Image: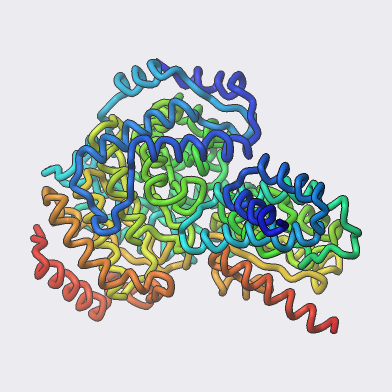
Amino acid sequence: MITYLDVLKGIHTGRICSERDFDLRTFAPKLKELLKAHDIKYDPENPVPADDGLADDLWNAAMDFYCNVGTYCLDTERIVQFDENDIAQTLKTAPREFTFGEGKQRKLLTQRRPEDRAPPWCFLGAGGAAVSSEENLLRLVQGYASIPMINSLTSPALTTVDGMRIVGGSPLEIYGAIRAIGLARQALSRAGKPGLPIMNCISTASSAIATIAASQPQFGLRPSDGWLCGTLAEMKVDYGVLSKGAYLLSWGANVCSETAPVLGGYAGGPEGTALVNAAYSILGTVIQKASYQLSFPIHSNFQCNTARNTLWAISVSGQGIARNASLPVFMLGYTASGPMTEMVLYETAAWVITAVASGTHIEAEGVCKATHVDHFTPMEPGFAAEVAYAATGIKRSFANELVKTLLSKYEDKIKDAPIGKRFGECYDMTTGKPSEDYLRLYSKIKKELEDMGLEFKY
Amino acid sequence: MNEEVLDRLRSGVIKGDEQAVRLTTQEAMAKNVDPIEIIEKGLIPGITEIGIKFERNEAYLTDMMMSAEAMKAGMDVVLPKIPKDKILKRGAIVLGTVKGDIHEIGKNILSVLLTAAGFDVLDVGCDVPASAFAQKAEEVGALIIGASALMTTTLPGQKDILDYLNFIGKRSKYHVLIGGGPTTPQWAKEIGADDYAETAAEGVKLALRELDERRKETT
């Protein structure tokens, strides 16, 4: 079995290779070769394919790809590579169940399967998007925690500390990270869910030093939370991500392998993006010793993943991982549009149905590409959770039809999607309740989904 | 005769075949094909074609990077044979990802598209301090500085570049273009950047527009 120390040794003893040669002479040709050899082809007519053979072919191709390509370490300019048998053995013997949260909110996370009758884990909140004030963070997190189906929180990120803009890598980042954790815990307590795990630790910290500093237990985090340890596009790590791992694994904390293959980037089209996403699941177990994979294949031009080709990549890679990997996988949706628009609810429904029917858990969500400060509310992840429960157990063929209908309502608007309204414009900031207009819109779109045949549980 | 060898050059660049482009360029030179013709009718149409394919989602980043390398292999053969005053350049652009940020896919896509559009791109890499952008721009006589940031907490690195340019008294000399996931037009306005590009293709359009405006000013 490959240990974390084997990985840390490998980054100093692996084959020396320039980053450019890794990208162009190792990664790209092997990806093309394996897509052809395994006959993996994008089918725009079926964004949610119901094809176990395709899912397994993709997984086998991803195994072959990972064994041949390995993981590139940017700091040492070496490729960490292990023997295929050692990789297979490590995957076989890796843990399959992980516990998150405390007290009444403690819960076991395991892998789902395509068309699974068990509902997905609902990892809800802002997807790390930025808020303008501490008051907004408190109010938002309280709202997220009040969603009945929530299993864990994805907290927003602070942009300022006492009016000073947080700069990544600076001492202020450490202050900001500590402040954000304290506020999130406070809001969870206000909502009566103090044990709810925060699984995007620490959204305000980008550097390893800020993550590790703010993770000291006195600031409020616990090993039963989850830490995002982001890989770099594509199949790359650096000292920063491995240092976070060294600290967290020594603490017995849950490491998240955060992976975001870029459609249009090194991974190429939807087929390559799906294959690389599946290969990341292997990397997550072998290199990062992760407790879960948080994946968001993302479109390089649109910066969202609700386009048809990204949904296909989400579905096929999700099915491949769910059917073959031990590491539980979450899909994180990024919508193009913003709050209080019909489009954001259509987009949310499309990616959630895709992910849930394909066998993954959900993180909901990065609203409005998670780029516009305060352009997200608890309504969108709440809607995502309702759709997720309604889509639990449905056949992929039905999911495919639903998603095609939803795509017809928004896909031509992705490029110039409406950014919608700010949190404060569609919520009463005193009571923490959504506006009547937003509630009406929510009910209207929910009714449309019911008319399409989706049965809501609540 | 020339057409056949120029066709092979175009095709070699599109395929990203570095070795073939190097050898074909040498062959063209040996056949006394005008070096300017080799560039303008062989190498540039090839890189332009791959840029068009990228915009149509028919080619992807690695295809473009391999094409750019193939084009460079040809240029390395042909450029020493051309008098400097005959080389038509659109202008130099300094590109990089700001201090504290190591994400560079978007920047790399823009780099190849700008190269395809005829710009001389100086990529300073990622996690780059503001002073390094300015120093490189001064060194190469750049028209434009492009700064990418992919995280909310690294956005201030874009403002740092503007602050640094102001500090050294060179702000007006450069057109500063920003981009990357969390950047917005509002942020560009707030920090005083000249332009904001949501996508790499938009970045190229903005760079070309700026070039045209500079040319109008000088004529």
* Above-or-below relation of B35 to A119: below
Which residue in the rendered view is the most extreme toward the front? B1
User: Which of A448 and B142 lies nearest the eye of the viewer?
Assistant: B142
User: Which of B150 and A201 lies nearest the eye of the viewer?
Assistant: B150
Among the 4 quarters of the image, the one containing residue A416 = bottom left
Q: Residue at x 54, y 55 (%)?
A: B151
Report whether residue A221 is seen.
Answer: no
* Above-or-below relation of B62 to A90: below
Among the 4 quarters of the image, the one containing residue B203 = bottom right
Query: Along the horizontal axis of the image, is A304 left or right of B64?
Result: left
Marker count (numbered): 0
User: Which of A36 and A358 lies nearest the eye of the viewer?
Assistant: A36
Report whether residue A38 is seen.
Answer: yes
- Residue A327 pos. (x, y %): 31, 33
User: Which of A222 and A419 lies nearest the eye of the viewer?
Assistant: A419
- Residue A432 pos. (x, y %): 30, 69
Query: Along the horizontal axis of the image, is A359 left or right of A302?
Result: left
- Residue A380 pos. (x, y %): 29, 64
Q: Residue at x 26, y 45 (%)?
A: A361
Q: Residue at x 57, y 56 (%)?
A: B106
**Quadrant, the C terminus of chain A:** bottom left
**Quadrant, the N terminus of chain A:** top left
Q: Residue at x 79, y 83 (%)?
A: B216
* Above-or-below relation of A51 to A302: above
- Residue A249 pos. (x, y %): 44, 27
Query: Along the horizontal axis of the image, is A456 left or right of A336?
Result: left
Query: Along the horizontal axis of the image, is A88 left or right of A69?
Result: left
